Amino acid sequence: MSALVIEELHKTYRNGFEALKGISLNVAEGDFFALLGPNGAGKSTAISIIASLTNKTAGQVSIYGKDLDRQKNEAKSMIGLVPQEFNFNMWEPVVEILVNQAGYYGIPRKAAFQRAEESLRQLDLWDKRHTQARWLSGGMKRRLMIARALVHRPKLLILDEPTAGVDIEIRRAMWQFMKQINSQGTTIILTTHYLEEAESLCRNIAIIDHGRIVEQTSMSHLLSQLNTEHFVLDISKPLTTAPELPGYNLQLVGDKTVEVTVQREQSMNSLFESLTQQGIAVMSMRNKQNRLEQLFIDLVAQSKSEEQTS
Amino acid sequence: MSTGRVKRIAYQTIVTKEVLRFARIWVQTILPPAITTTLYFIIFGKLIGERIGMMEGYSYIEFIVPGLILMSVIQNSYANVVSSFFSTKLQHYIEELLIAPVPNWIVLAGYVTGGMARGLIVGTVVTGISLFFTDLTINSYSLTLLVFVLTSILFSLAGFINAVYAKSFDDIAIVPTFVLTPLTYLGGVFYSIQLLPEFWQQVSLANPVLYMINTFRYGLLGVSDIDVRIALVIIIGFIALLTWYSLRLLSRGVGIKE
């Protein structure tokens, strides 16, 4: 069964801005799905419509087979949303925010306290349960929104830039947590500007730009479309000019650092052999740019030029 | 879980949240009206009132007590919903409700009940304070209670509509200051409209607050400037109208959804 099906979704705002121009999406049950796009592409509008925060202009949305127009309450009860902006009562204690949210889903107060405890412990916020939300750090506020979104145990969790502005340690802990709840069966839709995050977590991906889906495929298939990769090599001895290797484009960017562009059909072994023949040992190697980032930039640039042409 | 139970729990959750909100800040919500009304009782009831003499067969303080009680109900029911729902919008935690399977009428009922709770608690406190200054006679318990409740419902709804349209704190202050307070003061809290010239008596009849205050006064003292049956129809009619309008606003997402 599909966790989310969107058909021909349109949104035109009152000022005439057409944020969505008929997007269609299908997210399978249990998927970890990335919805990516530049700022203003229409990601948040799409998410707001799915979460009933924005009225659509046209189109259909169904969650686990429940139509958002005709079976509104059933559809809504299966969604959890972690929005981009903090949207809780800053003056309320953390535990009450969760208990109230559970209550809105029909969970009795006593059971709601148990659910709140469970969610807060999972997100490492139990010690802060009596603290007013405004006193939490930025990372804690993000985790509070995740805890709140999970308190009614949704089958579909939508995370709209959940790790924006949090430090790398917390971000990695959050990734681990997201992987864990996904492995337990929760379908996750993630939007993020950290493309390494999407690449390492998500199995399927859609890229949206100017209100249209420009790519929807599996992450592995998308990454296989990458024709060239750029690597940074740290070498053993200092050089004054870039080594010349037939078939490879190398540039010296530091006395002991070289950048190389490798085509998909070229092997890394032959690159290393050629360097070894010239007496250059590679001490370490890394991607110059995240692979998904390169594809993302290419696809968005292509979409932009198509938009300008049309 | 049955949908009826889900709705009942959602309603209880909103009401509990609303009551806890104003109870937590009782120094801002319960105490000020109690102090203000005590001053009214002292100044208008005792100091000035004793020089005014009788009004419609009652001492002046007896005459103004019903109006002052109802004024506190009106102001506090209105203030509770307008400030609470506007904050909900301003801080975007209205989204907690919009995303959840809570029907619009439950949202409205929850906020209106919260407004009623504050209006009725403050009204009860003011009634208690009035007993220090005069004896309270009750002509009809049922009518008194009915008007007490209907008035708090009506002004909670009015506060809700104000909050839906409000875009800034100015917008939630303008209506109470420039509309609600004049209507209440000119609605016969401190005087009988029989004291006014004929023209102004007719103008006063266009003021809906006049009907509530007079019906409440009739419930307590048994005297009124208007026919209480007509007044009840008008009050219930306004409640029906504002309920319909509030639900329409919620269903269209005015002020809360793009």
Image (cartoon, coloured by chain):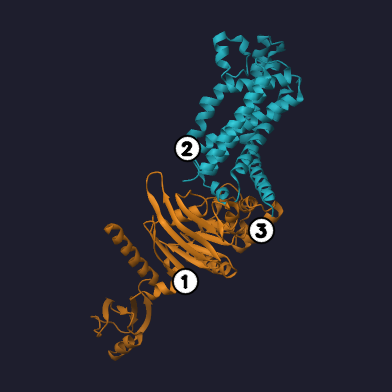
Q: Residues within 10 Å of mark 2 (few under 14, many from 20)?
A: few
Q: In the rendered view, would you say B218 is above or below A267?
A: above
Q: Amino acid at mark 3?
A: Arg
Q: Amino acid at mark 2?
A: Ser
Quadrant of the rendered image containing residue B196:
top right
Q: Is A194 displayed left or right of A182 in the figure? A: left
Q: Secondary structure at mark 2?
A: loop
The chain to which mark 1 is attached is A
Find disc 2 in the rendering and name its residue. B168
Q: Residue at x 67, y 44 (%)?
A: B16
Mark 2 — on which chain does it sit?
Answer: B
Q: Nearer the viewer, residue A14 or B221?
A: A14
Give residue A151's mark.
none
Looking at the rendered image, the quarter that the N terminus of chain A falls into is bottom right
Q: Amino acid at mark 1?
A: Ser
The residues tagged by marks 2 and 1 sit, at their Cα atoms, a distance apart of 43 Å
